[in-house]
Image (cartoon, grey):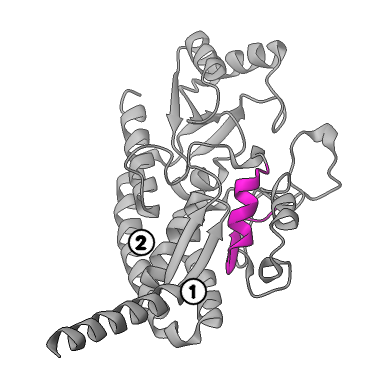
Amino acid sequence: MRRIFFALVVAVGFVLAGRAEAKKIHVVTTTPDLAAIARAVGGERVEVKAIARGDQDPHYLEAKPSYMSLVNKADLLIYNGLELEIGWLPLLIQGGRNPKVLSGQPGNLEASAGISVLELPSGEVDRSQGDVHPLGNPHYTLDPRNGLVIAQTIATRLQALDPGDAQTFSRNLKQFEQDLQQHLAQWEMRAKDLRGRRVVTYHKNLEYLANWLGLVVADYLEDKPGVPPSPRHIAELVGHMKRDNLAVILYANFQEAMAPERVASQANALALALPISVGGEPGIITYADLFETILGCLEKGFGGF
């Protein structure tokens, strides 16, 4: 009888565990930053997978069948929006054949809701201007203050999808907010000496980071957004850097290093590669890890100037 009772207890335990596992919300995000925030807010009640890696340029992903499979199984699809994923996400949604994540459904969430978007074009936008985003600069996760807004957006949607765990999501959100606010105070104290520093960047993907830290972007390696630099532009940029003593070039570590390194050599400057997403370097696991690493890189880079 004891053996039978034990077997029944074990069987019930497996059933309950299976139910708890099945209750998890399957979340798919387009970027690792959104995945990190969703994990923090969802906790044990979610299973989160990101499509892009932290060492990839999210503008230029291929719409692979494996990504479509992720979308197919998602209860909630969270994407950056502002046309960051315009070249591949519509194809994944179409190929994923998942009615839960179609536009307008509860399983479709654009994370940019509530964000103060930078660089909204004031006039018409066309391809002659380069890779200009008509809805504004989409790289808003590089300002950690926006992480607070994103977390609230995600928590609200998770609560709507699973009202029974609403308090859990609320507690997780509060903890995330408290932790990030503490980090923000420390980071901004450390970054005081960076305010007003003039830099050159490769692409217009560091505007939110610069805005938060008070860095001044004085020029770009690209002629136009998304357009490789021409020899004439490189020569003009080197002259600009020498005249105005622009000593640091910042670029994402997934971008080709040859151009910034060559310009830095000619202008007697430093080319500094930054991870700009969770997972962009080993050890960057959480959203806070990302900014701790970025700030450490900037402190080290500017230490010689």
**Image check: 94 left or right of 115?**
right
View extreme (top): residue: 266
The residue range painted magenta reads 63-82
Q: Answer yes or no: is residue 258 visible.
A: yes
Q: Please tell me in which quadrant of the rendered image residue 235 appears.
A: top right
View extreme (bottom): residue: 1
Height in image: 22 above or below 218? below
Is 151 one of the magenta-colored residues? no
Q: Quadrant of the C terminus?
A: top left
N-terminal of the pair, mark 2 or mark 1, is 1
**Image check: 223 left or right of 257?**
right
Q: Nearer the viewer, residue 172 or 212?
A: 172
Percent from the top left, x then y, of residue 287? 40, 53
Q: Please tell me in which quadrant of the rendered image residue 2 appears.
A: bottom left
Report the Cα–Cα distance between label 2 and label 1.
15 Å
Q: Amino acid at mark 2?
A: Leu
Q: Quadrant of the N terminus?
A: bottom left
User: What residue is drawn where x is 47% and y is 67%?
Assistant: 151
User: What residue is drawn where x is 61% and y is 33%?
Assistant: 203
Q: Amino acid at mark 1?
A: Ala
The label nearer to you, 2 versus 1, is 1
Residue to which mark 1 is pinned: 155
Percent from the top left, x then y, of residue 279? 42, 43
Circle 2 SS class: helix
Percent from the top left, x then y, of residue 15? 36, 80
Is 74 one of the magenta-colored residues? yes
User: What residue is drawn where x is 39% and y is 78%?
Assistant: 20
Residue to which mark 2 is pinned: 180
View extreme (left): residue: 2
User: What residue is drawn where x is 45% and y is 34%?
Assistant: 197
- Count of marks, rendered view: 2
Q: Answer yes or no: is residue 115 visible.
A: no
